[in-house]
Structure formats: structure tokens, C-alpha cells
Image (cartoon, rainbow, N blue to C red):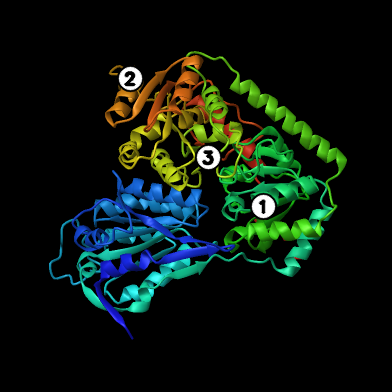
Amino acid sequence: MTTRRTTMAQALVGFLKNQYVERDGRENPFFAGAWGIFGHGIIAGVGQALQESPDFPYYVSKNEQASVHIATAYAKARNRMSTFACISSIGPGATNMVTGAATATINRIPVLLLPGDIFARRNVAPVLQQLESEQGQDVSVNDAFKPVSRYWDRINRPDQLICSLPEAMRVLTSPAQTGAVTLALPQDVQAEAYDYPEEMFHKRVWHIPRAEPDRAMLARAIEWIRAAKRPLIVAGGGVLYSEATAALDAFARATGIPVGETQAGKGSLAFDHPQNLGAIGVTGTPGANIAAREADLVIAIGTRLSDFTTASKTAFQSEKVRFLSINTAEIDAYKHAALPMVADARVAIGHLGAALAGHQVEAAYAARIAEWKQQWEAETDRIYALRHGPPISQGEVIGIVNRLSRPEDIVLCAAGSLPGDLHKLWRTRQPNGYHLEYGYSCMGYEIAGGLGAKMAYPERDVWVMVGDGSYLMMNSEIVTSIQEGYKLNIVLLDNHGFSSIGGLSGAIGSGGFGTDYRFRRAGSGQLDGAYLPVDFAALAQGLGAHVTRATTREEVEAAVEAMKSHDRTSVVVVEVDKEMRVPGYESWWDVPISEVSGIESIREARAGYEKAVTRERHHEIAIPEGQG
């Protein structure tokens, strides 16, 4: 057997740059390089290996959490067919990545994390930044990655890499099991040499399979669809990841079955598709949520059916409702006691379409779908055309950016009140044009995620819409975007605090307590003084961005139009009226309210909560016909 003597770190990099994926005959390298920040626990091992591998690009982020967000957004934009490795030193650099790992895993996005670790040989312990444990010596802060990783290993000997790396790739390339993969790398082992088999460095192509549905499940699904009077499709992120948008388009047109889109699934159909009722769930449109309430068959495709999608299990109210779930992951396919079709979305939709040729929903249902759609388009136009303020309304800003952006552009967001408004209002025109991280809804994802999406599609403009709360948490990757020459258009909405949670606080009777950026007032002892004078324009300018302030509708329009011609990352700062909110429609979200309180407004909110919670359904305990 031919061998190559290299360090463990050199072998790691050599392996990664020779991993490829293939689906439908299209092949590409799986790793686009590595992101990270060097520290003493990584620079002499993996750092030197990267230095010797200029064909495996190394990018320097300004925050380790941001590294993972960049990789996650890149992989999401690439439909999980490519990603980055993310490195860090042992200690705070490593734990900074834990939030990013959770974001990737919860959203089922592949990212490889390579944190440095404590010495395997132990003789110099405790080393700098080591967490000591009285329970054992094989514990480090990297154990914190275990619950948020789909695969976790610590490489205590250089030869362990030979077994661990293929397992890591198996998980990363799995349509069902993917997420964050963590390989903890003791800093002494990184530098150790070993005679690795030459085959380890050969090109390897990982085929991404398209799982076929079980024939019995397919037959039963066809029966259910034919029998349904009010079927509804819930399109999730799996529609996009499997590149099933064209198949769904054809199937929905042929059958007339309406479609409601989750946050991850928005863009599965163009906004003006006749069967697209838009957003569904807590942040949904009236038509989609009424259709959900009345549906007798819910066809869930590539969705986790989270509480926002199901309106905390209140969305589907028909006594006769049944669920058909098409998903690559069994954990999702079996939810809601569904008829579980464990299969690739594009393949399954194709089979259903062929079998249901000529089948259509009844004319009366089709007419209602058209009416709901027309009413929602009119409501969106109304919100877009508001002339509120100044301060301008958030809905108007969304409308301006939507109207002035190109069909192929990408809007990106993650947290605050913007995701709900974007889910309802943004008119997506092309697949992957709507990029929301809402599985973890991680504040700080936005600008780093924007950079990842831009790297995935350099030819498409990326519009990062971010509130002041998320912006203050992580704006550092503005510097990185300028450093690497990836221009972002950042629309920063200043609402003096946490608009989303402020609204929720009001709804639960707490009156916005602790959700504004205000001075502490001596008289009350609370944060209820004047607003903090944060100069967001100066902050962005100091990071190197082109900056514009806009107050009126006309100024916002001019600023957004001008951003398209700027040569580097640009920021427009817009003060918005957070009290001028986009309404909620036909939906509810379970946020438990104190059962006992000395505040009357909270007691009143609790009374409303006790009434609303009675609408929650226990779909899991139902046994679908023919399944028991």
C-alpha cells in the first residue's frame, strides 16, 4: 500500500479538497474553502496546512459565529450541494461557533466545524483556555457541540482521521441527516505526522440520491388526493433543496391544489402562480390560513411542520383532516400521524402528477382559491402604498425594496419583526430569491448570511434587511464583505429596540417592558427614559460601507435605487414606526402567559390565552385510515 507521510492537519485539508458531490449528473467540489480566525489552538496545525494549500481558499471572518453563518447561508443558497469548513481555536473561539452549529443543524444545513481542542497527551494540562473537569480528563468546551451536531468526534490519534472523515462526509451529504458536523482537533495531534494511505487523497464523488417512494404509500396517497374535497399543499424548504420547484409548479397547475409556503419554502412557486396562496401559519396570509383551517387533506412537502407553520397546532381544524407527508427524513414524515412518504420531493411529486393526470379540484374550491389570491394581492398593494409618517412603515420599506430589486435578486433576513412581514409581503419571483433563516431565527445571522448567499450567487444582488437589534449584535462582516469584494445591499431599519418582541410583549399584557433601547430613568428605576442616540450611519461608515440616511418614502426610494450602482457594500439607515405593524391574519401562536399576576393587563391577556389554547389539536394521536 502506498502511503503519504503528512501531519494530521495536512491530511485533513488534503482530504477535504478532494471531496465532490453529484446529483442528476451535475458534479461539483463539496467544500468551497474554509472560514475562521486563527488562535493558538489551530494556527500551528490546520493553519499551517491551509498555508500550504492555496487551492483550498481560507477566508478570515471577524467573528467565529459569523463564520458558521456564512457557511450555512452559502450551503442553503446552493441547495445543500456545497459548503465551507469552519475552523477556530480552542476556548472562546470554539464556543462562539456553538450558536452557528445550532443554526445549521436545526435548519438541516451541512456545515463542517473544526475547533481546536486540548492536548491529547495531557502532560502539559491545564493549557490556556482549558475547562478542567473533576469527572474526567477527556472533557473540553467542545463537548458543548454534541447536542447541536449531527455527528461529533474527537481525533485523539492521527490515524483516527481515516475512519472519521468518511463518516463526517456521509452525514454532511445525507438529504435526511445533514446538519453541523464537528470534529474536535487536539492541538498536539494536529501537528503529528502519520503515514496515511494514498487513496485517502484521491478524488471521491458522493452521489446525492433521490429516494423513491414506497409503492404502497404512493398508491394510498393517490387515493387520498382523489378523495379530498379541500386539499392543501404546504411547501417547505425541502421543495427548494430537492430542486422540485418546476415539478410543484406543474403539479399545482394541473390539479388546482393550492399551495401555502413556509418560511423555508417561500419561493417554491412564484408569487403570481395561480395556486400560490402565499405564506402559511402564524405569519401567513388570510387565504392560506383559511384553506388550512378547512382542509380535509394536508400534503406537507419538505417541511418540519414547526409551530409557526401549524400555528401551534391550531391551523388545521377540520374534524376530517388527514396528513400526507413527503420528506426525506422519517422524523418529519411521521409527524401529525401522517401517511409517511419517505422520498425525494421532486421524485414523489413527479409520480403523483403522472398518476393524477386529469384530476382537478372541484370548481367551487378553485373559485375560492382565486378569490383568496386576488384579495391578498390587493391587501399587499394597500400596505405597499401606505404613506405613513415619517417615520415610514416597515411594510412600505419592504414594498420599495421588492419593487426596485430585480427578479433574480435575493432578500435575506433572520430575526425580529421583519421575517413575519417579509413572509407575508415579499413577492418572490424566482427560486432561492427569498432567504430566511427561521428555524433558529438567529439574531446576527443577517449580514454574515448575506455574505454567504452572495458568495453562492455572485451575479445576484443580495438585499439584507435587518433590524437595529440584530445589527448591533453582529455587523462585523460588513468589513469582510468589503475585504473580499462581495457587495451587499443592507437595509437597516431603526425602530429603537426589539420591535417583534415589543409587539409580543404588548400582546401578552406586558406593555413592551424591556424591549426598547432607552436610558434608565432615575424616577422609575426602569429603562423607560429617552431613546438611546445610536448613530447607525456612523457605525456603518466606520466599517467601510457606503452609507445613506433616509427618512421619507421618496428618500428611501432614491437610496435603494442608488445602492444598485454602488461599488461596495452599501447601507441605508431608515427609521421606521414600529407601532405601524403589518396585521396578523387568521392565526395564533402559543406563548404561555402568567397564570397568576398582579398586573391587570396580564390577567386579561391570560384569559384570552386560556380560550385560544383550547383550539390546539393533538394530530399525533390520530391513526390514519389504513395505517392502524
Of callouts 3 and 1, the N-terminal one: 1
Is disc 2 placed on a helix, strand or loop? loop
Residue 210 found in image quarter: bottom right
- The amino acid pointed to by label 2 is Ser
Q: Position of residue 86 (x, y in %)?
A: 34, 55
Which residue is labeled 2 in the image?
A: 524
Asked if residue 552 is positioned above or below residue 200 in the image, the reply reads above
Which residue is labeled 3 in the image?
A: 592
Q: Is residue 315 something one can see in this rendering?
A: no
Is disc 3 placed on a helix, strand or loop? loop
Q: Seen from this angle, which residue lies furthest left? A: 124
Query: Badge 1, how many Cα within 10 Å: few under 14, some, many 20+?
Result: many
Q: CA distance from mark 3 to mark 2?
A: 27 Å
Q: CA distance from mark 3 to mark 1?
A: 27 Å
**The N terminus, quarter of image:** bottom left
Which residue is labeled 1 in the image?
A: 300
Q: Position of residue 32 (x, y in %)?
A: 40, 55
Q: CA distance from mark 1 to mark 2?
A: 51 Å
